[in-house]
Image (tube, rainbow, N blue to C red):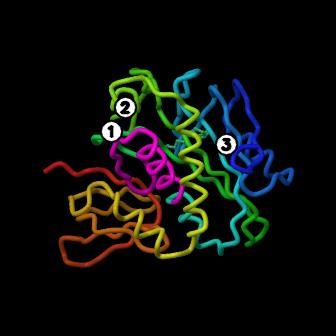
Amino acid sequence: MLNNRRVHRYSIIGSTNDEAKRLASLGEPDGTLVVADSQTAGRGRSGRQWVTPPGAAIAMSLILRPAIPSFQITQVALLGGLAVLEGIEQATGLTAQLKWPNDVLINGRKVAGVLAEAAFTGDKLESVVLGIGVNVNAGPPLDLKLEYPATCLAAEAGHPLEREPLVNAILAAFDARYRQLGTAALRQAWAKHLAMLGKKVKVIGPGETVVGALEGVTDEGAVVILLESGERRIVLAGDVHLREE
Ligand code: BTN
């Protein structure tokens, strides 16, 4: 048990998200943690590979069973990013930002990512697996094709860091924010850390690409883009890229 939650620990695993999904389907309760020292088949968003070198990173997944309507599940991923940011800031004293939807950046480089995967029975949300990956003492290998410049906490702090206090700080931040699911307080806290606010960005969504100024996020966790025409566009899923002039 850790902070009152069930914990499944592995020294090496394919993907903690895959294991958490398997355990969720067997009925593991809300809050259960799956944590591994290294992953051989870690997954990122949009089918990307996620590398977890042994001993150098945090790879963990929470099994969640939130009592929320399906349309609010985007908020769970936002909550994950916010908890990681708050845990990192609390444990290291570093300042981080959130790149929508849930990347954590330090000095404009990605230090952590979140992968939320939901399971439904019909329309009913059964579980969400919230996967968290943090580069702690080593960034990803240089030959990896990255969608964004990456860094690790040790490089930003200027010294190596213990993983255990970071995990505890992230979980404590998560537990405090989990109670705020479905409330505007969560969006307000999230929006305070939004990277690229007011900047010209390109949002690549599943069906469309939108270019405009990044204005904020809605309560549901969608990003709001102000087009040059003055029209506002709300995008629920996708990736934000800084648009160079
Ligand atoms: C991203 O930024 O693309 C999301 C990365 C999420 C990586 C974590 S590591 C723990 C968990 N298990 C996985 O296979 N992926 C997530």
Specify few, some or many for label 3: CA neighbours under 10 Å numbering under 14, 14-19, or 20 or more: many
Counting residues from the start of the chain, the first of labels 1 and 2 encountered is 1
User: Nearest the camera: 84 or 237?
Assistant: 84
* Callout 3 touching callout 2 (CB < 8 Å): no
**Which residue ends up furthest to the right in the rendered image?**
26
Q: Look at label 3 and name its amino acid.
A: Asn
Q: Is mark 3 on a helix, strand or loop?
A: helix
Q: Look at label 1 and name its amino acid.
A: Arg
* Residue 45: numbered disc: none
Residue occupying image coordinates x 74% and y 40%: 19
Residue occupying image coordinates x 57% and y 40%: 167
Quadrant placement of the N terminus: top right
The quadrant where residue 142 appears: top left
> What span is in magenta?
79-103
Q: Is mark 2 on a helix, strand or loop?
A: loop
Distance between mark 1 and mark 2 Cα atoms? 6 Å
User: Nearest the camera: 112 or 43?
Assistant: 112
- Image coordinates of residue 239 in percent, x first then y, are 40, 53
**Is 59 one of the magenta-colored residues?**
no
Q: Mark 1 points at which residue?
A: 109
Distance between mark 3 and mark 2 Cα atoms? 22 Å
Distance between mark 1 and mark 3 Cα atoms? 24 Å
Q: What element carries label 1?
A: strand
Counting residues from the start of the chain, the first of labels 1 and 3 encountered is 3
- Image coordinates of residue 219 in percent, x first then y, are 46, 74
Quadrant for ligand 1?
Answer: top right
- Image coordinates of residue 145 in percent, x first then y, are 41, 30
Q: Mark 3 points at which residue?
A: 17
Q: Mark 2 points at which residue?
A: 151
- Image coordinates of residue 74 in percent, x first then y, are 54, 64
